[in-house]
Image (cartoon, coloured by chain):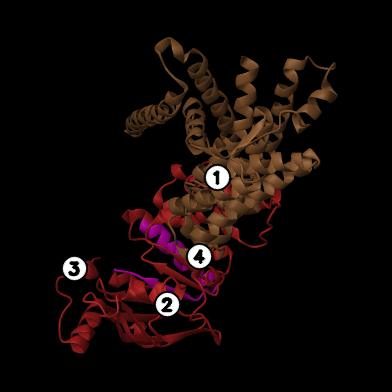
Chain colours: A red, B brown
Amino acid sequence: MIVIKNVSVTFNQGTVNENQALRDINLNVREGDFITIIGSNGAGKSTLFNLIAGTIPPTIGTIHANGRNITREPEYKRARYIRRIFQNPLLGTASNMSLEDNMMITYRKGFKWLKRSLTSKMKEYFRTELLQLKMGLEHRMKENLVMFSGGQRQALTLLMMVLSKPALIMLDEHTAALDPKNAEIVLELTDKFIKEYKLTSMMITHNMNHAIEYGNRLLMMDQGEIIFDVSGDEKKELTVEKLIEKFHELRHHGFENDRALLAE
Amino acid sequence: MIEGILVEGLIYGIMVLGVFITFRVLDFPDLTVDGSFPLGAALMVQGLLLGMNGWLALLIAFIGGVLAGVVTALIHNHLKVPNLLAGILTMTMLYSINIRILGNRANVPVLDQDTLLTDVSNRLSGIIPDEYILLLFFIVVAITIKLLIDLFFRTDLGMTIGAMGNNEQMIISQGINPKTLKTIGLGLSNGLVAVSGAFAAQYLGFADVGLGQGIIISGLASVMIGEFLIMKSNRIGVLTFCALAGSVLFHAVMYLGRYYGYIIKMTPSDLNLIKGLLIIILLILTQSRKLKMAAFRVRVVK
């Protein structure tokens, strides 16, 4: 579905600060894939997401979506079928607006320029969808989002993303900024929604257990390269130890100085 | 005196609504205002002198203002010029354009000309006491514009513009081009400012290229007074009301400064200093109130 061909991204090309963030990446995201991505800081995980979302263009190489070349398509146009959730829970919603207004804006379907789509029928629909979150938000439709916790806002962003049924969703450590309890809730919701709505998804995580537990395919990145791409039964049999061993075997150096990667 | 303050406050209140849209809703400090205000005045006065219908001249003034805002938006969006600088560029260019519109003059009077205001006065004279006609007229005009803005910001487009001022990434993630929204917002805002300038010119009896000087500061001060006096809210109807009320209060202060300032040996040229100090004082007061609110919230949470 999304095919990345021979893509490299170099920042500050031709200067002393030249930094090759991605090196000759080839990746085919198949429909229905749930890919988890691990790798240490600076491995290029977020750059890969920025590249697919259209925030940054590739220095060389092409990106296709369903056979269409989207290499030069701006971010806001790609957002119509590729949606992402950021680590910062504040980026998905508007703080100074009410919950129902936020839901209307993020619902996207049937944007009517000078008409008001937020009718009582729409509110009722939003209220029933909010029940899925089991957070009691359906009683707080008129409250400003400033009053909501990061976990609630992230869950809301997730719900609204799912309702718009995008072709690909990208989760950039979307639970990392939440407390452990909320992180757990949001992650379980994510898994539930992805299965229920059969969404093609990619998820960056710093937690190896999560990377193994969730999804049907796992990518390991290091220094701008995808060094390990595993799916199917082979992925199911993975353990944290096996992953670390694999990394040693491939790179001849360990995950030292990156305890975050091994965090529970 | 009271009618004078109210009328002035409401005329400039239309401009304040425009400033409110850019500064507060769009989060785009737009200095085009200093140019689009006299632009509206110039277009209105020239329209009247050419014998145009008053309402048609007002419409042209509005469209002129919209175009000024669109130019600023285009400079900012496509040349990646920072928002402040983009506004200053348009404002500077408008100075020359305004003099051109006024027929290479800096000041054009409309004192013996029929204007929208004399027309309204003539029609209502005898029905309402003369001194209240203009007041009533501007109450109706300002409230109508306020309600139209309220309505606009409750539509899908308006809500999305509101969200962009809050969180631009969120709008990009919805598949909407923020450049388009900025262009619409800036156009609308400067259109209102030009309408305000058009009414001001008719009220004062002349159009002057210097009419817009420092108008952005007056607008900002009015917005801040309105916000300070009435507790924070996210209801657009309350916010636009605050902007209008802030404008009236600001003009009350300026009126006092102009007519009674001599008591403390103030001259009209001191007014700009007073405006600036007013903003600084309001900023300090808002800061301390925020700190108090934060302390209160911590206590409640504990």
- Where is mark 4, residue-wise? B78
Query: Magenta residues, as a range?
Result: A183-206
Report the mark closest to the observer, 2 or 1. 1
Q: Are marks 2 and 3 on the same chain?
A: yes
Based on the displayed image, in which of its 4 quarters is residue B278 positioned?
top left
Q: Which of B8/B41 is in front?
A: B41
- Between A186 and B100, the residue placed more toward the observer is B100
Label 4 or label 2, whichever lies nearer to me, is 4
> Dot 4, crowdedness within 10 Å: few (<14), some or many (≥20)?
few
Chain bearing tag 2 is A
Q: CA distance from mark 2 to mark 1?
A: 38 Å
Question: In x, y percent, where is residue A122?
Answer: 67, 52
| Residue A205 highlighted magenta (yes or no) | yes
- Check disc 3 and report the residue beneath it: A259
Q: Which residue is mark 2?
A: A57
Q: Residues within 10 Å of mark 2 (few under 14, many from 20)?
A: many
Percent from the top left, x then y, of residue A220?
30, 80
- Residue ID at (57%, 25%): B248
Q: Is residue B42 something that shows in the picture?
A: yes
Q: Secondary structure at mark 2?
A: loop
Disc 2 residue type (three-letter):
Pro
Tell me the quarter of the image containing the C terminus of chain B: top left
Give the CA separation, mark 4 to mark 1. 21 Å
The amino acid type found where label 3 is placed reads Arg
* 4 and 2 marks on the same chain: no
How far apart are the alpha carbons under marks 4 and 2?
A: 18 Å
What whole-number distance in Å separates the C-alpha atoms at marks 3 and 1? 58 Å
